[in-house]
Image: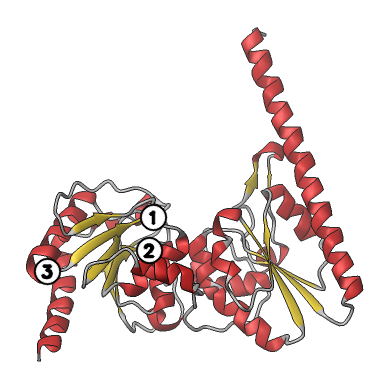
Amino acid sequence: MTPKRFIQIWKYRYHKYIDILLSVCHWLYTYFKIKFYKITHPKQLLIGILLAEHFGDIVACEPLIRALKEQKTNSKIFWIVKPAYKELLTFNPNVDVVIEEFSVFYSMLLAKYHPFDQFHNCHLSGLRRYDYLRTSLKNPLALSLDIRTDNYFNHGNILEVFAKVGNLPINNISPKIYIPQAVIDKIKGFQLPEKFIVIHCHSNYSPKDWQIYHWGKLVEDLIDKFGFSIIEIGLKSTLKVYHSAYYNVCGRLSLLETAQLIKDAKYFIGIDSGPAHFANAVGTQAFLLFGKLGDFENYMPYSGDYQANKNVKYIIKEGSACSELSYDEVWTVVSEEIGKNVLKEKI
């Protein structure tokens, strides 16, 4: 064994055992802190919700907490979430305590040995892996219901599926996003164009995405034909658009700032992704590009208005991935709807 390889092995072992130790320490801290709270508040029902990611799922499942709070009026709800998504829950009046997830192993321990009166694990089995121990978070209820990663959309939209695997009451309405006044004021302070469209071009799963060169042409045509400014959101842009009415704010906004920007927009155009759940939550009229997703020929992620085809136009490539949508298939729907609305506003 070379010295370099020896150092690599021991560095890995060091990080592994430190991470395991800290995960156990964080779990113990959470466990006894909640146990102590239970001792001092014996009549209050303590409920734990484990849904740590992704942010679209968290937004989509907001109605579950409203329904739970209505049923369990004398309850205190704790939601375990990854730190990156904490802001989505901090201002939710139905979530009493937001607990930051230290690691997947921390959540595995909490799911198996929890201090709550009720605990609801909303994750599917096998999706969240803890590589140091080569194991993953399990959900026995999901397994007993035979709800798996390869068939979950056969059991309903995201809200319905997570309610089933988490043993939570289903409240199949549009989600809400709670945005503080400071965020609203910050977006207003950007001096945005009078009328603009927000677009989102990239998801965390490339088969959901549309071709980049189509997005570029769509942006230019929307500007030229309808006079809208276009604001692109997301983590990173790959568009090559050079126009004074195109704004790239990718990677520059927080989640709640992104939600408020979508709320202020005239339209949202995007693929199946987290920002589309924001659009559903804030009630912005949307055009959503869909295609076949794995074995799912047709699937519906959304609840409420978007599920009922209210305030949304789905542009679907039947039998093929979203990337196979032609430009004309998208432009025809978008231009006709926007043109019709522009005409109404002039009358």
CB contact under 8 Å: marks 2 and 1: yes
Which residue lies under the disc numbered 3? 227
Q: Quadrant of residue 274?
A: bottom left
Which residue lies under the disc numbered 1? 203
Local SS, label 1: loop
Q: Amino acid at mark 2?
A: Asp
Q: Nearer the viewer, residue 117 or 136?
A: 117
Q: Position of residue 99 (x, y in %)?
A: 69, 61
* Number of marks: 3
Which residue lies under the disc numbered 2? 272
Is residue 298 visible from the viewing direction of this image?
Answer: no
| Cα distance in 3D space between marks 2 and 1 | 7 Å
- Asked if residue 281 is positioned above or below residue 19 in the image, the reply reads below
Between disc 3 and disc 1, the foreground one is 3
Query: Mark 1 packing: few (<14 Cα in 10 Å), some, or many (20+)?
Result: some
Q: Position of residue 249 (x, y in %)?
A: 32, 54
| Mark positioned earlier in the residue sequence (3 or 1) | 1
Between disc 2 and disc 3, the foreground one is 3
Q: Quadrant of residue 163?
A: bottom right
The numbered dot on residue 10 is: none
| Mark positioned earlier in the residue sequence (2 or 3) | 3
Left or right of 202 in this view: 102: right
Q: Amino acid at mark 3?
A: Gly
Is residue 224 visible from the viewing direction of this image?
Answer: yes
Q: Position of residue 230 (x, y in %)?
A: 22, 62
